[in-house]
Every structure is written in structure tokens, then in C-alpha cells.
Image (spheres, rainbow, N blue to C red):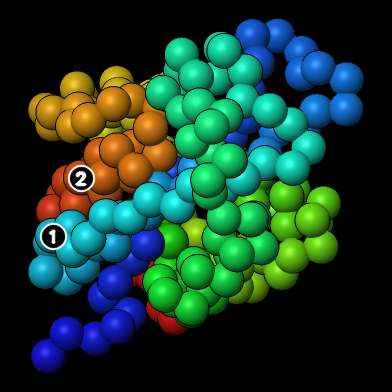
Amino acid sequence: MRHESALLNVIDVEATCWDGQPPPGSVNEIIEVGLTVVDVSAGRRVSRHRLLVRPTRSKVSDFCTELTGLTQAEVDRGVSFAEACRILVEEYGAGERPWASWGEYDRRQFARQSRADGVAYPFGHPTERTHTNAKAVFTEAYGLRKKPGMDQALQIAGLPLEGRHHRGEDDAWNIAALVLDLSGRGAWPVTAV
């Protein structure tokens, strides 16, 4: 019998960005949340999801569109940040289920934006209990001196890059493949929930 605690949410966010400093009054805001649900004990990716999020204090720059493929018109059809957090909690168990991201950016961006928007942080507390930095685990498991980017880690692990890099849904899917690689090597930490 599969237990709910065997499920892990792998999250990757894309945020508004610029080539250089943001325009006056603009801040980085999440515009896409990619989520892949992983059944760690079964060793498989269960499902993949994408939430587009409408920014309120910034616009999608040409640089950001070139990097992510996301346009202002596309994210204008997204949900509010508060609604995205509600969906993560109610539909994907974000408050109880452990989660992982590649590095600390995603966790920090959610924390910053939650504070700025007055929205409850969706992933439960304390963060150390629920979040795993997959980049740090990978770096240690492979005995690397420098932490690799996700695309470099895929090459090191001999895994293909599926989809478009810097697209949240695709990056979450690829990070999930790295999590499963680490789990298969016995290097993925067991998270108690």
C-alpha cells in the first residue's frame, strides 16, 4: 500500500526578470509554477502541472520572454499569486507534502512574495522540515566541488533534457528525474512528514 508520505512535490518557478536591473518599482514576481509529483518509493514521476501566475508589480520583459518563452499576454491569463498558493495547498498538499527544488531560489522567492503579498507561505513550517535543495544533494552525491545547474546535472547523470530549459513545467519534470536518479543511488534523504 502506498502512503501519502511517499509523494514529493518537485517545484520550479519562473519569475519576471530583466537583462540588468529591474525598471523602477518593479520586483521579481513568480509568473509560472511548474510542479511534478514524484512517488519516491515507486521510483516514478506521477504527474506534471503548470500554474501561470499574473504579476502585479512588474511586467514580462523581452529578455524574460526570450529566456522562458512566457509572454505578458500569456501570464495575464494566469491566476493571482494568492490563488496559486491556495491551489498548491488544496490540490497538491503543499502544506503537508515534502517538496524539492533545484537550489534555494524557488523557496526564497515564495517566502519573499508571500511576505510582500500578505499571503500565507504554502509549504508548511519549518521550511527545513519540508524542503530539500536537490542541487545540494546532487553535488554531494556526485562528489562535485561546484554546484551544477540543472542542465549540467542532467548531463552528469546521463539523463536527457526534456522540453525547454527555463520553462517551469519542464524544469520541474527534469529536476524530478534527477531526484529519482539520486533516490536510485540511495542518496535522496528520507523526509518525515
In percent of the image, x 67 and y 41: which residue is there?
55
Residue 58 in the figure: left or right of residue 85 = right
Provide residue 25's location: percent of width, then percent of height.
Answer: 88, 27
Provide residue 184's location: percent of width, then percent of height.
Answer: 13, 53
Comes first in the chain, label 1 or label 2? 1
Q: Residue furthest top?
A: 20
Secondary structure under tag 1 reads strand
Mark 2 residue crowding within 10 angstroms, few (<14) / some (14–19) / many (20+): many
Residue closer to the observer: 186 or 19: 19
Q: From where the camera sits, is residue 141 visible?
A: no
Provide residue 178's location: percent of width, then percent of height.
Answer: 24, 42
Mark 1 residue crowding within 10 angstroms, few (<14) / some (14–19) / many (20+): some
Tell me how far mark 1 sits from mark 2, CA to CA: 8 Å
Residue 121 in the figure: left or right of residue 35 = right
In percent of the image, x 41 and y 23: which residue is there?
69
Tag on residue 44?
1
Tag on residue 177?
2
Q: Name the amino acid, label 1.
A: Arg
Instruction: Locate the C terminus by quadrant.
Output: bottom left
Residue closer to the observer: 148 or 161: 161
* As drawn, 64 above or below 48: above
What is the quadrant of residue 24 in the picture?
A: top right
